[in-house]
């Protein structure tokens, strides 16, 4: 049975109209994360309710937009996020889509890139901004980055193109520190600095200085059809990261998991892997069992080019699918999404190589 969704609560803001037209309406979806944490009696950071965040950020009432907040029934640390949470977020956005001009998702940083990538697939034909943000330092601390991240994310979610007067960023994105990044291109690269996220293989969609400077040529166009919210993900998947000395026992233990449907294979450089007979046999047998294996580079700026070197020349014949310049986060969530569509083997393989939401660069 699907859970009953919580209802948004309005925040009284400063203006109902801007320049003679209604102010933008933005829904904040609070999931938890460092942005809304406080210390418990043992000195550990634990999630708090959004009402406590709102009390610490009175400037939210001064924003020139109509703002509402919807909190998940229980705030969660992002390390505990599971695919069911992504389906819930997609459903919340779908059921509130007509009421708001944009959405901001407050989320923990550890798995934000996974969640943003997953939502990009689940929200097909998205025509409004869904901006993930959070903080490295809780909102109650003096040197918090929560205020700047949240205020700028709200500004982006409400932004319209100055000429076309259309939605400025009809995408799932991550905004952090000063960069707006496509959600399925984001990767967390820092745990001790404010610039926690980067997009190595695709330019930022905007940079926030005194003003927010958008790079319109890299932003997806408005969709041609209505929003479609998918509600199925396949979680019988793995990530197998290669390393020098990996053994047949380890590889077989992972690829022969009961009911496994597919996996992301993190290889070296441009998609290279060992050519040991036992390794190639493991891959061949996995393909014959119907597993879909997506080849992704371990390099942050890497791109898989199967066949460029001898050590990847066998992959295509073994049914391994090249992942181009996709990130691991976007690859594993794409695998969950595509397998969840329950297509034929040929259709599934095609979709895994196809650029669904701007997650890969096809050359």
Image (cartoon, rainbow, N blue to C red):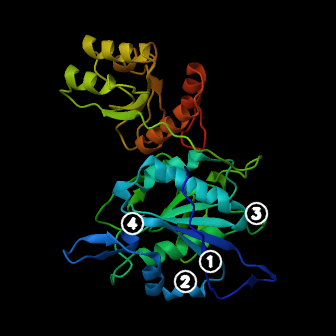
The front one of 157 and 100 is 100
Who comes first in sequence, dot 1 or dot 2? 2
Q: Residue at (38%, 20%) from the top-left corner?
A: 312
- Say if 116 sits above or below 162 in the image: above
Q: Which residue is mark 3?
A: 166
Q: Which residue is mark 2?
A: 60
* Residue 32 in view of the camera: no
Is label 2 in a helix, a strand or a loop? helix
Q: Residues within 10 Å of mark 3 (few under 14, many from 20)?
A: some
Q: Which residue is mark 1?
A: 67
Is label 1 in a helix, a strand or a loop? strand
The label shown at residue 33 is: 4
Q: Residues within 10 Å of mark 4 (few under 14, many from 20)?
A: many
Q: Residue at (47%, 53%) from the top-left corner?
A: 85
- Say if 293 sits above or below 335 in the image: above
User: Left or right: 46 with respect to 155?
Assistant: left
- Say if 250 sits above or below 12 in the image: above
User: Where does the image place residue 289, in percent across and percent down from the top left?
Assistant: 42, 16
3D distance between C-alphas at marks 2 and 3: 24 Å
């Amino acid at each position: 049975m699907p859970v009953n969704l919580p209802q948004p609560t309005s925040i009284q803001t400063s203006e109902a109209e801007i320049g003679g037209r209604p102010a933008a309406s933005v829904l904040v979806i609070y999931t938890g994360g460092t942005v809304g944490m406080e210390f418990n009696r043992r000195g550990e950071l634990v999630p708090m309710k959004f009402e406590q965040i709102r009390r610490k950020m009175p400037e939210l009432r001064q924003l020139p937009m109509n703002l509402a907040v919807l909190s998940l029934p229980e705030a969660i640390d992002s390390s505990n996020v599971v695919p069911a949470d992504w389906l819930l977020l997609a459903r919340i956005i779908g059921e509130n889509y007509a009421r708001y001009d944009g959405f901001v998702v407050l989320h923990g940083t550890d798995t934000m890139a996974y969640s943003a990538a997953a939502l990009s697939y689940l929200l097909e034909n998205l025509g409004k901004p869904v901006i993930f943000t959070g903080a490295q330092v809780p909102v109650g601390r003096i040197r918090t980055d929560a205020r700047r991240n949240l205020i700028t994310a709200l500004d982006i979610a409400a932004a319209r193109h100055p000429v076309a007067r259309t939605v400025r960023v009809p995408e799932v994105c991550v905004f952090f520190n000063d960069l707006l990044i496509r959600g399925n291109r984001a990767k967390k690269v820092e745990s001790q600095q404010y610039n926690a996220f980067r997009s190595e293989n695709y330019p930022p969609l905007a940079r926030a200085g005194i003003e927010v400077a958008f790079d319109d040529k890299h932003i997806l166009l408005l969709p041609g059809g209505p929003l479609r919210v998918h509600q199925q993900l396949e979680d019988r998947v793995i990530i197998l990261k290669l390393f020098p000395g990996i053994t047949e026992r380890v590889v077989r233990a992972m690829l022969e998991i009961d009911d496994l449907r597919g996996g992301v294979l993190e290889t070296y450089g441009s998609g290279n892997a060992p050519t040991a007979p036992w390794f190639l046999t493991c891959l061949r047998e996995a393909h014959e069992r119907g597993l879909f294996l997506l080849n992704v580079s371990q390099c942050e700026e890497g791109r898989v080019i199967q066949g460029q070197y001898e050590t990847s020349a066998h992959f295509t014949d073994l049914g391994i699918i090249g992942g181009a310049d996709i990130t691991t986060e976007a690859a594993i969530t794409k695998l969950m999404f595509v397998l969840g569509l329950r297509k034929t083997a040929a259709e599934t393989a095609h979709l895994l190589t196809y650029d669904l939401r701007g997650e890969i660069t096809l050359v």
